[in-house]
Every structure is written in C-alpha cells, then in structure tokens.
Image (tube, grey):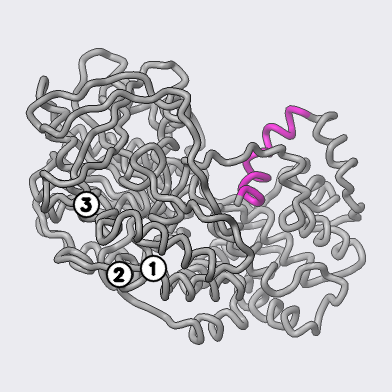
Amino acid sequence: MRFFTNTCVLLVCIFSSLSWANTPVKSELNRYIAFDWGACPEMFQSRNGQNLCTLAQVPLDWEDPEGEQIEVLISKHEANSGNSKGQIWLLQGGPGGSGSFFVGQFDSTLAPFIEDYDLYILEHRGVGWSTHLGCSNPPSLNYQAYWQACFDDLYEQWGEGLYDFNTTSAAKDLDYVIAKSKVLDWLPSHVYGVSYGSFWAQRFSQIAPTGAQSIILDSVFPATGTGLDLWDENFNKVFTQLSNYCDQDTLCSSKFHGETERTIRTLVERVYDREHCPDLAFIRDELQILATLATMRSVEQILMPAYYRLARCNGDDVVALNNLHKFVLKGVGRQLLELPAKDPKSNSQVISRLISNNELNDVQRDLTERLAFCKDAVACYPNFLLMQKSIDKTIWGNRYSDEYVYKNMSHYMPTLALNGDVDPQTPHYDIPLLQAAFTNINQRYVEFAQAEHGIIFVTHMNEGNETCGAKVMLSFMENLWSQPDTHCLNNMKGLNFAAKEFESLVLFGSADAYDGKAQAMTPELLMKLKHDHPDKFLESFGTFARLVDF
C-alpha cells in the first residue's frame, strides 16, 4: 500500500543517515506557545522558496508527556493570497514514505489549494526528517540475519519505546500540532491523507473526533476487513477490471477480440509451464512483476501490447519482448533515464515493517497460501519476496497493539472518501468496509472510473492542468454541507491502451507496440534515440520511469 515515493517493491532498501543541508529550528513541547519557523531541509524546500519548517518536540509516549521526547518535522506554506481560508494538513502514505513528496506538487497538483489555503505537511514520526528509524548494522546478503540484527539494535536503543512509533502516536502528534498551529490565528483545518495516510487520518478521527473541520481520504485503506497479505489477490481482481476496460476500448478489444481476461489468463499459464514461446527471456516471476508494475502505475499501453505479442510469439515478437525485459529488469532503463540515487531520508523501511505487520493485516494469509495463489496468477510478488515478507512477520509482527488497532473510526466530522476503480493497492471494492463506519449523512464517497492510486494526483482531465480529484476535494472543502461538484468525472482522460510511437520504439524496438518488425535495442542505440529526440524522450519519461523506478 505505497504511494509514489515508497516504491521499493522488489528491492531490500538499506538507509543510513545523512547530514542536513539546513537544520530546522526546534519548537518546544507546549501547545500554548506558537511554533518557531525557519529554513527547511533541502528536500523540503519548495521551488518558490516560500515554505518554512520546524521540528516540533513531542513525547515518545503520549501517556508519559514528561518522559523522553522525539521530533517531528512540520512544513508550512502560507496561502499565496495572503488571506487564508484555512489549513490543509497533508499526510503521506507508505507506511514509511516522506511527506517531502507533497512539496514537489505545490506548483502542479496542489496549485488549486495553495492560493487560498495554508498547506502543512507533517512528517510521520520515525520517517525522513522527523526522528528517523533506520538500520545501522552493515548490509548482509542474509535477509533474515540483516533484519533481525536491525530489530535487535533498535530494540536495544529504544526498548519498548520502539513500539511508540505507531499510527496512534502519529495521530496524537497530528492532534497536537494542529492545535499548536492555531495559537496566534485560529483557522479551520482540513486533514488530507493518501494511501496509508488515509489510515493515519482515520486513526486521528478516533483519538480526536472533533479535531478538524473535515477529513479527506484518498485511496482508502479501511481499518478493518482487509490486509496487506491480500496484495496479490487484489492485483488479480483489479486486473479483471482492467481487462473489462480493454474490452470496451476499440484498439485493445480489436487485439483480444473482446475476451481479454480469458485470453491472457490462459496464455500466462502456458508460458509459466514453458509450453509456449520458449525463447522468451521473461520467466514467471518476471512476467508477474511486469504485470504488477504496469497495473499499479497505469502503464496499460505497454502491458497489453506485451501480452498481445506474447500470444502470437513470432520472431519479431520475441525480439520486442526481450527488449522490454532488458529495459525493465536488467537495468537498461535505469541507465537510460539516469535516475538519481534516492535520498536516504525519503523512506523508513523500519516504520514500514513495524506498522505493516502490526496494524495493516486484519485479514491474513500464510506463506503457503500466498505461494499457492501466485502459482498461476497474472500479477504477484515474486516468490523470494513472499518469503521475505513471511520473515518480516516473524521479526516485526505481533509486537504491539492498542485500543484503536483494527477498530473502525467513529466520528462526526465531514468526510470525503475518494477511490479509483483500477487501484490494486487500495481497491474500490473495499470501500463498503469504510462506508459501514460512516456515522452521518455528511460523510461521502466519490468513485473515479479508470483511475488508479492517489486520486488527486492521477485524475487528469482532457483540458486544463487541474485534476478531477483536486476539483472534487476543493468543492467539498468550500461547502462542507453540500454534495461536492463531480461534473469533472465526465471529462477525465482515463485509461490509454495506445502507446506513443517513441515509447514503442524504445521499449519494444518497433514503432508499433502491438505489431510490426522489431530490432534489438542496445544501450548505445537507446542512448542515441534519447539524444536525437530530446523532446520525445522528455514527453515519454514518465512512462519509462513508472516501469523502472523501483
């Protein structure tokens, strides 16, 4: 259940601490004294240089406010108009992702809000530039030994306080900083959470039922009735929805004759059994990785041509598919894109493991069940990663609980929930679990057709730069007692099954993703294409990055 920045789907991420370009000022633990604001760390600096940051001191254990303190980073960007209508508090997903992602959206997706609202970002405790939880032990090829040593080191450092890096404590941090932000000027506050951030926001509603004027839940992870062990099952259910949309699309339907799902499921079983296309470089785990990435990141214009070529499997198709294999899984794409190293502060794999294994698995599957399910599935974690996740449970799981874990929210704050119907990470068919927790008529749900994860960031429209999700959210905030305006749902771009010619050439070695002669794409040839067509490369960069930036 990740959102954008936390994309280590297939790798073990090991982070070490770095020095900061700027050390923010600190604000003492006292809700009646205003924050002291100063410069932000480099990754939290907005392009216009107008946001400020502070390190708020908070108790490690809110039940012991006089005990040990930690720090949580807060960023504030005041409304451009100078006459703010209120605050929007932005909660990032993961768990373990850094809120620095939002800063890069100030002049794009978040632009409709920044004119008249103060935008606040709270960095989750244990993550990024808040008091950070990371492993200090040296890297090891032995997965279990590495993570056990990491856990042991952290427990030696923090003792039982390690388990205070949880969602309930983070929700209490939010309640405290919202109150502290209003010492000098009371303004209405709206809490927005995406992915795990929606779970965090729900926990906030449990510990502070009147703590904000509204809550917006984007790509919702319900508190009960689901779990991260269902990840692979969710992807395959959403693949059914994606296939149905293919059958409704003129181009895609013409390739699969209106039977997309049946054709592909039958096809991959034959490939997994090595009964079809023996010269294909992709093995089962790798085909499942491709399906997972493409479904999660809405790269259907590459996935469906790959299946179409796989079904036919002539000489050109094998060349085309092996080009794609090298680009996605053999490092050729990362080399071409020259992706910068990820900032070690952009994620906490420790927080991810702690919270995932103690709070996000109400419905569980054991390793045997998951391996059996993945045997013939279209999209799945590779076997080695399923085994690693089973090890994570034994190291990090069953470590803590509290009165709110696996309990539904219950509050009367106006609430807006947003979800896409091709989102495999937080699938739309789980929304009734959330709606069952709604406690009044001013808690609303809007579903976005053909939309994936992170609604306010991905629901681009046919005209203009605003997203439909952002328009619906703004409409809701500006009139909390009315149904939000959803007219933009009829003007969304939606899914796209037709790859651009340049994308096709780079990824398949053919100008037509579905058909045509393919040439083997060497790194040298790809680099020449990049330098000869810089505008086209830049236009397609997002597609390429979604396939290889993990």
In this view, which residue lies farthest toward the top?
Answer: 82
Alpha carbons under labels 3 and 2: distance apart: 15 Å
**Mark number for residue 169?**
3
Alpha carbons under labels 3 and 1: distance apart: 18 Å
Between disc 3 and disc 1, the foreground one is 1
Occupied quadrant, residue 224:
bottom left
| Image side of residue 332 versus residue 41, left or right | right
- Residue type for callout 2: Arg
Alpha carbons under labels 2 and 1: distance apart: 7 Å
Decide: is 145 above or below 489: below
Quick check: marks 2 and 1 in contact, CB under 8 Å?
Answer: yes
Q: Nearer the viewer, residue 332 or 478?
A: 332
Quick check: marks 3 and 2 in contact, CB under 8 Å?
Answer: no
In this view, which residue lies farthest toward the front?
Answer: 156
- The magenta-colored residue range is 534-549
| Image side of residue 200 versus residue 246, left or right | left
Prevailing secondary structure class for the magenta stretch in the rendered image: helix
Sequence order check: which comes first, mark 3 or mark 1? 3
Residue 220 on the magenta segment: no
- Residue type for callout 3: Ser
Q: Which residue is the site of mark 1?
A: 396
**Label 1 residue SS:** helix
The image position of residue 185, as x and y in percent, is 11, 21
Q: Which residue is the site of mark 2?
A: 399
Sequence order check: which comes first, mark 3 or mark 2? 3
The image position of residue 346, as x and y in percent, is 47, 42
Decide: is 240 above or below 195: below
**Label 2 residue SS:** loop
Q: Nearer the viewer, residue 362 or 510?
A: 362
**Label 3 residue SS:** helix
